[in-house]
Amino acid sequence: MKKRLLIRGGRLIDPASGMDGIYNVYVREGRLEAIIETASDETDITSTAADLEIIEAAGLLVLPGLVDVHTHLREPGFEYKETVATGALAAAAGGFTTILTMANTLPVNDNQSVTRYIIRKAAEAGLVKILPIGAVSIGLSGQVLTEMVELKEAGCVAFSDDGISVANPAFMRQALEYAAPLGLPVITHAEDPELSCGGTMNEGTVSTVLGLKGIPVAAEDVVVARDIELAKLTGGRVHVAHVSTAGTVELIRNAKQEGVNITAEVTPHHLVFTDEALRSYDTNFKMSPPLRTADDVRAVREGLKNGTIDCVATDHAPHSTIEKDIEWSAAANGVVGLETAFSALYGLVSEGVLTLNEIVAFFTINPARAMSLAAGVLKVGSAADITLIDLDKNWTVEAETLRSRSKNSPFIGQTMKARVLKTIVDGVVIYNG
Amino acid sequence: MRLDRKDLLTIKDLSLDEIGLILDTAASFKEVSEKDIKKVPTLRGRTIINLFYEPSTRTRTSFEIAAKRMSSDAINISLAASSVKKGETLSDTARNLEAMRPDCIVVRHGSAGTPQMLARHLSCSVVNAGDGAHEHPTQALLDLFTVKEHKKHIKDLKIAIIGDITHSRVARSNIYAFTKLGARVTAAGPRTMLPPGLSSLGCEVTTDPREAIKNADVVMMLRIQSERQNNSAIPSAREYARVYGLDKEKLSLAAKDAIVMHPGPINRGVEITPEVADGTKSLILEQVTNGVAVRMAVFYLLLGPVREED
Amino acid sequence: MSTATVMDAQQMERALSRLAHEIVEKNNNINDLVLLGIPTRGAFLALRLRDKIKEIKGHTVAVGAVDATMYRDDIGIKKEAPTLKEMDIPVSIDGKVVVLVDDVLFTGRTIRAAMNALMDFGRPLCIRLAVLVDRGHRELPIKADYVGKNIPTSMTEGVKVLIGETDGINEVYVKAEQD
C-alpha cells in the first residue's frame, strides 16, 4: 500500500471550518497532511509519485466522513438480521465512517463484556469506526442502572434504552444524574408506553381510514417535555432520538432558548415520508416513532434547518422477512437507512428545502458535536475519514444490491440522486462504489 | 358483465357501477336459495378456501353456503395463530395456499390490511371477509342490498350508524357504501368510540344518538364488544345501553317507516333492546339471508370470467 | 358486412301461428301445458305463443321464463361472466308438459343448460322444445319438436332474430360473420 494519498480537485465541503471549494487533500499515514486549494497547489508530486496514490476527484464532492449517531447492528443475538460486519459494510456504502450502535442486542449491551465484544467484532470487520452505546438500565428493564462508569471505560460513548422508552420518570432522573459527571449524553426514545399501547401508526385520519390503532403525537411530546424538565433538574445531557412531531420540535426549541443541555436528531424517513405512505400496508413503512402527518414533516424540516434539531441519524433498524413479511399488527418496527440516508437528504436539496452545505453539516460536524466525538471534520492532523460522493449519479434502491443483511427499506424501488463513490477511513479506501 | 378486478378487498375502491353490478347479480342469486334444490352448477369444479384467522360462525357459514350453492368446493381453514407464531411469512402462507390451486381465497384476519397483503402474493382471487377495524365489504354490500329491497333506492336516505365506530370495520365499509350511493350517513357514539378524522370518510359525526336517529330511514346498530370494554372507552354497559342503546323511545324519533339493522351477533339489552331487535322494523334476519345471495354474486363476478394470464 | 333477410314480420307471424297450432295439436290437455321462454327473446316469443294458443283454444296457458345462465358450460372460459337474466317459474312444473321456447336453435348447449335448470325446479312429465329458427350445427344430441323455419347456414354465418318487444322490428336475417 502506498503511504500517501492525494484526493485531487474535488469540491471539498467542511462545515466545521467553513471551507467550500476545489481542494487537493493530502493524506499521510492515515492522517490529513495538507489541504491546498487546487488552483494554487504547487506541490511537486513527481518526486514522490511511486509513493503516492492519486484519486481524481474532479466533479465529486469531498466530505468529512459521515457520522451516524443512531444505528442498530443486531450483534450479538440477531445475526440473521445484521452483524457488526454487514452493518459496517452498509455504513461504508452509505458514506459513513463513524457510527454509534444501540444497546438493544441479545444480550443487551448493559455490561462491559458485551461492549468489548462489539468493539472486537468491529475491529475484525475493519471497516468503519463503530462506537457502542450502553444501555441505561440492565436488560432495558427500566429498573436498575447499568454500570455506566465501566461501560464508558470499555468504550461506550452514550447511554440509551432505545427501542423502548424509559417509562419511569424517577428512574430517568437517576440515569441523567448518574451519567452527568461522566460527560456522556442519555439518548431518550420518547414514547409514553401507555399512550402508545397497541398503536402501530400515527393516530389521525389515515389510521382511521386504515382501521389501525394510532399512536397520538402526545405519546412523544409528553416524554420529551418530561425529559427537558429532568435535564433542567439534573444538569444531565439529553439527546432526543428520532424527533417525529411538531410538538417535540417546539418543546426542544424552547428548551434550547432556555439553555437546557439538549440535542436532537431526526431520521431521513421522518423528513421524507408521511403516514399517507402506509395506505398500501407496506410494513417497510412501519417504524417507531411512526411516520406522522405533513404538518409534522414540515415542522421537523424547519426544526432541522433552524438548528432546533442538530443532526440527521438513520435509526438503521434491520429486520428480516420473518419480522416484516407478516400481518401489519405483528410486524416489527424499523427500517434500514444507512445506504439511503445521504441520497434521501440530497433529495430535499433538489427540492429546495435544504442546502447542500446544511445537509453535510447534519451528517458530519453536528452529530459529532452532539455526541462529543472527534469526527466529522477535515482538519490537518486529524484522522483521514473522508467520503467522496457523485451528486449527479442516479441509482435505484434494490433489495438485491443493498449491503445490509436486511432489506426493509422504505426506499426500495425509488431512484435517488447522489451516489457514494468512495469511503475512506484512516486514509484507507474501505469502500468503492 | 365483469368486475374488472381480481380481488374484492374494500368498498372504498369499488366504483358505483361495480356496486350496482354486484347488487343486480345478487338479486338473481337470491332466487337460488328459495328453491327446493338450492344449488346451481355455476362454479362446478372451482375451489374456494375460507381462510379465517379470527373466530367467526356466521360470516364463514355464509361464505361457505354461498360457495356450496354454486357447486364449488368450499374448504374451511381456521387458524388461531398469527404467522409470527407459525414462524411463517405471509409469502410462505400465500405460496402454500396457491400450491393447492384454489380459485378464490376468502380471508378474515384480525390485523387490518392482511387480505391486501395476501392478494399481492396470490394469483387467485381474494375476498376480504373482514380485516381488523378496516373493512368488511360483503357486509356493506348485503346491507345495501337489504336496504334497497325495502326502500327501492339508496339516494337521499338518511342512515344512522351507532356504536363503537373506532373498532368497526362494518361501520367503515357501510359509510363508504351508503355515501357512494348518495345517502346521508351520520355516525354516532361516545367520543371515545369515534376515531379522529372520521368525517373525512364522508359522514357526519355526532356524540348525540338522538341527532343521528332523528328522521333516519335506516338505523344501524353496531355490536359493543364486551371484550373491548376493559379499555375504558365506556364506563359501563349499563350507561352505554341507556345513552346509546336503541330502544322504542329513541326509535320513535326516526322516520315512520324506518328500518333497523345490525350486523350481528346482537348483544340484547346493550346496543339494542329485545323488543326493537325482534320488532317489525328489524331486518336483522333478512340481512343474514341476503348475505348468502350477495356472496354468491361476488363469487360469480370474480370467478365467472376467465382471467387473462399476466 | 353482408346480411340477408330470411324472414320478414309477416313470415315470422305465420311461423309462430303454425307453432302454436302444432303445440295445441300434440297436447290435448292444455291445462298441463307450461310455456317457458329462454330470455331474452325466447321469453317474449313464449308470450306470443301463449296469446296465439288463447286465440285457438280460448284458454290461457301458464307462461314463464327459464334463465339457463347459471347452468351454462362456458362460465370461467370467457372473458366475461354471462349476464344473469330473469328466472320466472310461475307454477309448479311437476308432472307438467313444459315447452321450452327459444328464438334460434344452434349448438344445443343453451337448451341443455335450460333443461338442467328446469330439473332443479321440479320433475316435469316431459320437456318439449319450440324454436323460431333451427340453423343446424348441433353439438349435443338435441332436437326441436316444433320448428318455425329451418335455415341451413355455415358455421361462420350468424343468425339474428329481431322482435318488436326488444328491437322495435320483427325480422330474421343471416349475416356473413358471427358476432
Image (cartoon, coloured by chain):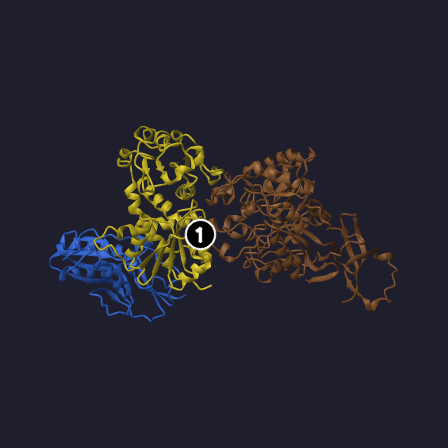
Chain colours: A brown, B yellow, C blue
The crowding category of the residue bearing disc 1, from other C-alpha atoms within 10 Å (few below 14, some 14 to 19, many at least 20), is: many
Which residue occupies the foreground of this view, B135 or A193?
A193
Q: Chain of mark 1?
A: B
Badge 1 is on which residue? B114
Q: Is residue A16 left or right of residue A224?
A: right
Q: Is residue C178 left or right of residue A208?
A: left
Q: Residue furthest left?
A: C28
Q: Is residue A164 left or right of residue B83?
A: right
Residue B66 position, x and y percent, is: 31, 53
Res. B264 image quadrant? top left
Q: Quadrant of the N terminus of chain A?
A: bottom right
Residue C15 position, x and y percent, is: 23, 61
Q: Quadrant of the C terminus of chain A?
A: bottom right
Res. B144 image quadrant? top left
The type of residue carrying mark 1 is Thr
Task: Please indicate, yes or no, whether residue A350 appears anywhere in the rendered image.
Answer: yes
Which residue occupies the foreground of this view, A389 or C161?
A389
Residue drawn where x is 60% and y is 37% of the image: A173
Residue B195 position, x and y percent, is: 46, 38
Task: Note whether A283 is above or below A421 in the view shown.
Answer: above
Secondary element under disc 1, as helix, strand or loop, is helix
Task: Note whether C95 is above or below B261 in the view shown.
Answer: below
Residue drawn where x is 83% and y is 56% of the image: A34
Task: Please indicate, yes or no, whether residue B225 appears anywhere in the rendered image.
Answer: no
